[in-house]
Amino acid sequence: MALGLFKSSSPLTLGVELELQIVNTHDYDLVASAPDLLRLLAKKKKPWDVKPEITMSMIEMATGICEHYSDVLTQLEEIQEGMLDCADRLNIGICGGGTHGFQHWGERKIFATPRFSQLSDIYGYLAKQFTIFGQHVHVGCSDPEVSLYTLHGLSRFIPHFIALSAASPFVQGHDTGFQSARLNSVFAFPLSGRAPFVETWADFSQYFNAMAATGIVKSMKDFYWDIRPKPEYGTIEVRVMDTPLTITRAAQLAAFIQAVARYLIIERPFQPRENDYLVYTFNRFQACRFGYEGTYVDPQSNEHRTLSEEILLTLDKIEPHAIELHGDEACAALRRDVLTSSSDAALLRKEWDETASLSETVQRQCLRWRA
Amino acid sequence: MDFSFLSTGPLKFDFLMRIAIALLAASLLGEGLWRFARLPRVSGYALAGLVLGPLGLGWLDAHDLPYYRVIIDFSLTLLFFELGIQVHARWLRDNPWIIVSSLLESFLTFCAVFAALYLTQRDIRLAASVAAIAMGTSPAVIMRVVAEIRAQGQVAQRLFVLCALNVTYSVIFSKLIIGSLHGVFNGDWLAAVIHPLYLFLGSVGVGAVLALTFKWLRGFFDLSDEQGVAVLFGLLLLTLSVLEALSLPVVLAPLLAGVMVKFLDPRPHLWPRNFGTAGAILCIMLFALMGVSLTWKGIAMGGLTALALLGVRQVAKSVGVMLLGPVSGLSVRQMLALGWALSPMSAVAFLLVEDIRTLFPAFGAQVGSIVLPMMVILELLGPIVVQLALRYSGETRKKGT
């Protein structure tokens, strides 16, 4: 399959996808009820974008094309309400968070579509281990060159997005010590990581065709990159975030990404270079492991600072753009969280401390998602 | 040398020996069925009970029943409390179609069994009693099978709820009928009205006290650790003795208490691990003892009728579930599975027959001659049907099932 043309979309529009957990309400383990939920949602005959994911305990909801923060929030609220109504009728719980605290990957069931079955054949147990829950944010780009510029520019901010969204401290019943342990599962895939450093669509197509010729990939979907272009939508898609515990947080993150993208596109504050990526995996690891407390190495100056300092600096720089995009309130909320070291991961750890039970922690995740 | 410490005369084995043999035989047969054929262990327990009972070797019989009753009653108290905790009152509010389909399923079962029996035997009281008992599904069977294959999903979940509801109707209806028998047999109509009312309200009261005590204790104990098991056992034994002192049915109060506990405290209730072990032993006994009242004479009397009624009952239950399945949110496959999974009958039916027999021996024997063969067939085959149904619905999580 060829890469196809990059379809132009209106600049800086947003699209948000959230992968959610489906749990039972008895012990709050994951339950394979995605088909039930989809069947009930289909009866509502609404134009909501709700899709199955690779295992049957996951479900994905997505907004349409949004202009601003409030737009994202309204659309997410509407789908959430409909989904909770169906979930209540099935006596199942829906919640955010990047991982399920105590599920056993071996018990997961692959959702029976040709693509998921094929992935399961290729990746074996990795496919079931991929029962992790992320937020994806699409940012509209007017042309492919802008999309590649934005992609490489945003790469510097990947640690920011990770730390602000981190919501996966627990894996398979244990505290991992990470703020976002979810991304460790993504690393296992051979085609994960970052996009190659190419700056023109011609070069990118050439790279894609060369990869396709090797027979390893068939479409852009086969790349599990942190940020990848989505030519058929005319967007780039940021994929490193954990699904937050609330949709408000999800919308705030989208607003932050939108403001950073506007800052990059309008101010062109730096020219991306291959060497930016020297510190990329280090920074990314620090963000996953330590969150706000992690070390951030500035790819330009090689200066070291804490990620919280770096995020606050970024928030200062993008403020005029956030105001322009009506996202200043959302960014202010994120600033408060950085200043008070509040994150979803910290919240989950606190609840685990209080309840001494991961089941109960998941129950509270469900209540929080509903709030 | 004085050998008087040795037993003199022929060796005598008391009922403890018979219980021990029943436990050993049942657990070995159950484990064998599971290991070699992946069939439910409970079928093996019931099979052992039949082999040891009057139909087979005759080692266990109704003679010792008063001793066994404590085991049976306590197992049921545990089971019903556990079942109750799995029933969310909130769900019934969010999806009222589940209650409607429960009512429909039970109503159709009652009508179908009543009609079939009345048309052949022309005895209203007999038809009504058997029909009331036939409404219920065995919680013991479905809970053991669901736990054994670790089933989880809409079918397993609804199975618990429909079972809790249809057993409740079954017990109340049976008591109503016993009440009306009072009227018929003794001309005492006031007793006929007040008795079932007392049973129900009494159960609600005791259930509420149990639920509140449980919730209060949960503030001090982690009820999922070892200490918790002792506390929980003590609490349920106490409940059982109170129920018996008040002449209330053993199943309704713990069931209602479980529902109230989950309603008052929606946190996850993890069943204590050791509690599962202790509960499992009681459960083995429960199944092994179910065969004691069944004799070849009884089978000759009611066996054929029982077979016919089983067919009628299954059709009624399946149709009941199928009619409202789509509107309550089930797929066709799930509806089919749920209808079949509702088939088991066991200890509750046994107890209801016993209750009638205690009050009205001759009539009780008549009811038993039909219900007991139904129950025994379903004790052997019911678990297998439930397992197949849950496999068909794709809800098992245990390897090899």
Image: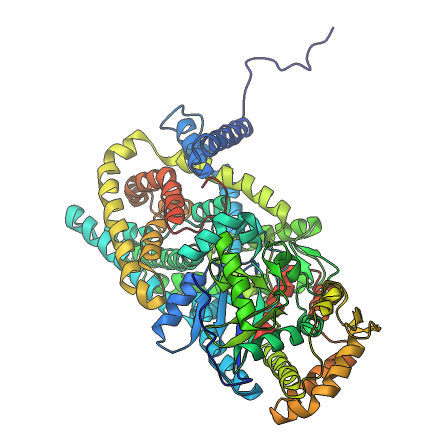
Q: Relative to B177, is B378 above or below?
A: above
Query: In the rendered view, does B48 fall on the left or right side of A190?
Result: left
User: Residue at 57% across / 58% down in the picture?
Assistant: A27
Question: B340 and A236: which one is in front?
Answer: A236
User: Residue at 53% across / 53% down in the picture?
Assistant: A127
Query: In the rendered view, does A280 fall on the left or right side of B241?
Result: right
Q: Relative to A215, is A271 above or below?
A: below
Place of residue B330 in the rendered image (x, y in percent of width and height, measured from the top left):
35, 62
Res. B253 in view: no
**Quarter of the figure that contains the N terminus of chain A:** bottom left
Place of residue A306 in the rendered image (x, y in percent of width and height, measured from the top left):
82, 73
Q: Relative to B159, is A229 above or below?
A: below
Question: A340 and B361: which one is in front?
Answer: A340
Place of residue B316 in the rendered image (x, y in percent of width and height, measured from the top left):
25, 54
Res. B14 in view: yes
Place of residue A186 in the rendered image (x, y in percent of width and height, measured from the top left):
61, 59
Please, which colouring scheme is shown? rainbow
Question: A293 and B320: which one is in front?
Answer: A293
Q: Relative to B169, is A227 above or below?
A: below
**Quarter of the figure that contains the C terminus of chain A:** bottom right
Q: Please identify the quarter of the rendering in which residue B209 is found.
A: bottom right
Q: Please identify the quarter of the rendering in which residue A266 is found.
A: bottom right
Hey, which residue is sitting farthest top in the picture? Answer: B1
Count of number-bearing discs: 0
Question: B31 and A35: which one is in front?
Answer: A35
